[in-house]
Structures are given as C-alpha cells and as structure tokens.
Image (cartoon, grey):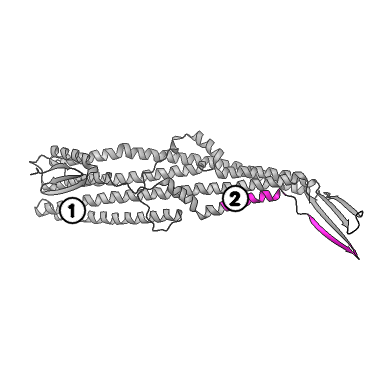
Amino acid sequence: MVPPNRCLPLQRNLICFVGKRRFSFPAAIQADSISLCRNLHWIFPSVIVMRKTAFLFVFLISLLAFAHANTDTLIDLDGLLAEAIANNPELSALMAEYRAAGMRISVLRYLPDPMVSIEWEGENRMYGISQKLPFPTKIAAQSKVEALTAEQDYLKYAYRVNSVILDVKTAYAQLYFSHGKAGAAEKAVSFLKQVYNVTLNRYALGEASQSEVLRAQIELSKAENDRAAAEDDISISEAVLNVLLHRHVDEPLGIPREPMSQIGERNLEELYAHANEHEPMLRAYGVALKKAAVMKSLAYQAYLPDFMLGFNQMDGVMNDRKYMLGFTIPLWFIGKQRNLVREAEFGREMALADYEAMKNNVMLSVKRAKLQVDKKKRLVALYKNSLLPQTEAALKSALAAYGVGGVEFEHLLETATLLVRIELEYHQANADFFTAAAELERVIGIVD
C-alpha cells in the first residue's frame, strides 16, 4: 500500500497520491515533481496534512507541466522570413521594376536606328542610308543615369524587404505574447478551480463564508473569460502572420519560440557606421546625389554637337554616289542649353540637401531605436532576474506558512495570482524587446 502524500516514479509516468486521490504526470516533470513532493512532505507532515492542501500540490505540479510543454511544433522564424520575402506580391513587383530598369541600361548603349530611304525622280531611283551619331560622351552619360536609376529601384526593394522583415517579426512577437497570455490564463484557471473546490469543501465544513465561495466563483469565471480571449488573440495573431506570408488566414502555425536578438549588444558608433553604409533609403538618397551630378554633366554636354552621316547611291549608276556629314549647332544656347545647366545645378543642390536631411533623420532614428532596445532589455532583465524569482519565492513562503496556519488563504490566493500576472508581464516585455530590436535592425538596414 502506498503511504498518503507520497510519489512513486513508475517507468514513464509519475504517479502521485494525495490523500486517496491518484494523479499521473509525464516523465519529463518527474525529477522536479519528486523534489517538490519531498519538500511538501517536510513542510506538511502527515499529522497536519489536511484536505485543503491538496489543491496547492496539484497547482504546483501543473506549473511544472506547463514548463515542460511539448515543443514538437515550434515555429522556425528564419523559415517564415524567407517565405514572406519569397511570396510577398509587393516585393515581386519591386524586383520586376528593378529588372526592367536593368534592361533599359543595355538599350541606351546602342546607337539610334539608322534610316534607309528611296527617292524617285522620273525613271531614276536613289537609295540612301543615314545614321545619327550622338556625341560619344552623351551615350555613356545616359547609360550611367539609367544604371543609377536601376540601383535606386533595387534599394527601394531592399528597403521594403527590411519593412517586411519588421512586419513579420512584430507579428511573431505578438503571437509569442498571445501564447504566453494563453498559458498564464490556463494556469490561473487551473489554480482557481482548485481554490473554488477547496472553498466549497471548507464552506461545507463551516470553515469558509458564503462570500468567499462567491468570490472564488467570480475569480474563476473571470479567468475562464480571459483564457477564451487569449485563444481569440492567438487566432488573430496567426491570421496577421499568415497574411504576411501570403497564406490562408486560417492556416495553423504552431508555437513560437522565445524571441531573441543580439542587435542590442552593438554600441551606437557601430550602429551609426552600419546605417551610414547599409541603410537602403539613405543609400538611395546617395545614389540620387550621384545621379544629379551625372545629370549636370549631361546638361553641359548639350553644348556638344550631335552628328549625322549619310550615303546615297543612284540606281544603275555606280559613279553617282553622295556622302553627307552634318552636325548640330547650339544656336539657342542662351535660352536653352544654359537653362538646362542651371536646372541640373539646382537639382544637384536639392539632392545634396535631401541626402543630408535623410542622413540626420536616419542617425536620429538609430539613436532612438537603440535607446528603446536598451530600455526594453533592462525591463526583461528586471523581470527575469528579480521580479519572477522574488514572486516565486514569495509563493513558496506563503505556501509553507499556510501549511502551518501562518497566513490567511486570501494572502496565498493573492500571491499566486501575482505570480501569474508577473509571468504575463514578462512575456509582454520580451515581445516588446524583440519588436524594438527588429525596428533597430530595420533602421540600420539589416538587409542591403
């Protein structure tokens, strides 16, 4: 016969007896549960163990079960990011625009199409061919302009990739928090069910008032409603993520891992340097500045002549050939070419001012994002290293004191509820930190 309030490890399952009740738990929590049983037996000797302590034991076992939850369906964040980039329609359109711009570069490297002509004069026919020849440097400059335009199109694509990565990571963090919220709500329901049952038993024995029973019932109903709301939040978070992945909104995703990021380890100077070199929009403004300089050079080249070569041959008369060489003259340069140069100079000044303004905005965004990451990181450390351990210790202390009648049942309930709330806030802080880190990655241009 098994002594009351003892635990026996039986192969793959842990069988626990509290009074005459039998509980079976997975082997994954066996070691922690056996240690807990020994502590409970030390705190509650068999002489003073009463029915009202049974729910406390089951509650703590439940906490261990949640800690060792099945992780076979964990989400691969890197896989989600790759899928989002591959399937996003807007990214596909921007990539097509970039490739189309690349095709224009090769087109401008060719001369204009030659013109073939036929002339009739009575019975005589004359065949001719002519070719327009832009000044050689103009062709190179026009090709350079199109090459820089294509580079701007690619940087627009890279900027949108960073934005998609931020959107996916933000939705992933929200899904992580929704799962954490659901887990905390489930713990609260499990615990409050035990509270309600024990309160009913104590009420039947005359040890609890009717108001305590009603309060326990109200708290349980609120916790069950919170659990249902948390499940709805998971569905919404999954739908948002599925839309970003271009999937059906109802497709299941699995359980997200705890989000982590190392971007906060880099100092401001490193982040400034990375952003100055890799941030796509800042680079696009830099390319616009180069493009403005080429446009200015092209405007000056409007003073240079274009040429026309021609050849004519009379039909049947081999010696009747005509050759032609023509070129343009910038006759109206005062009102035409000079104004083109001025326009290009103003364009370069505007491009330079836009670049400097964008650079200042990027550096400000980097600093703001870095400070947000540091703040969120400190908050996560506060919960992980201080608030959570202290609250867990307070619950253990309240449990031990309650076993010998040292504290009221209300105090134990409040302490356990506080632990659930602290865990929920810890998940929120973790999600906020990951979102802030993702924003910092976008600001510095993690994809260029």
Secondary structure under badge 2? helix
User: Relative to the observer, which residue lies in front, 172 or 372?
Assistant: 172
User: In the rendered structure, which amino acid carries the disc numbered 2?
Assistant: Tyr
In the image, is 120 to the left or to the right of 163? right
Q: Is residue 404 magenta?
A: no
Q: Is residue 117 visible?
A: yes
Q: Which residues are magenta?
A: 95-124
Q: Depth-wise, is mark 1 or mark 2 nearer the camera?
A: 2
Task: Identify the residue at the far bottom of this view.
Answer: 122
Tell me whether circle 1 and circle 2 mark residues in contact (CB < 8 Å): no
Where is residue 172 drawn, in percent x and y?
A: 40, 49
Residue 402 visible in the displayed image:
no
Q: Is residue 210 left or right of residue 448?
A: left
The residue singled out by tag 2 in the image is 98
The numbered disc on residue 109 is: none
**Residue behind mark 1:** 196
Q: Secondary structure at mark 1?
A: helix
Residue 211, given in percent of the width and then of the height, sits at 17, 55
Mark 2 Cα within 10 Å, few/some/many (few <14, many 20+)? many
> Which quadrant would the C terminus be assigned to in this image?
top right
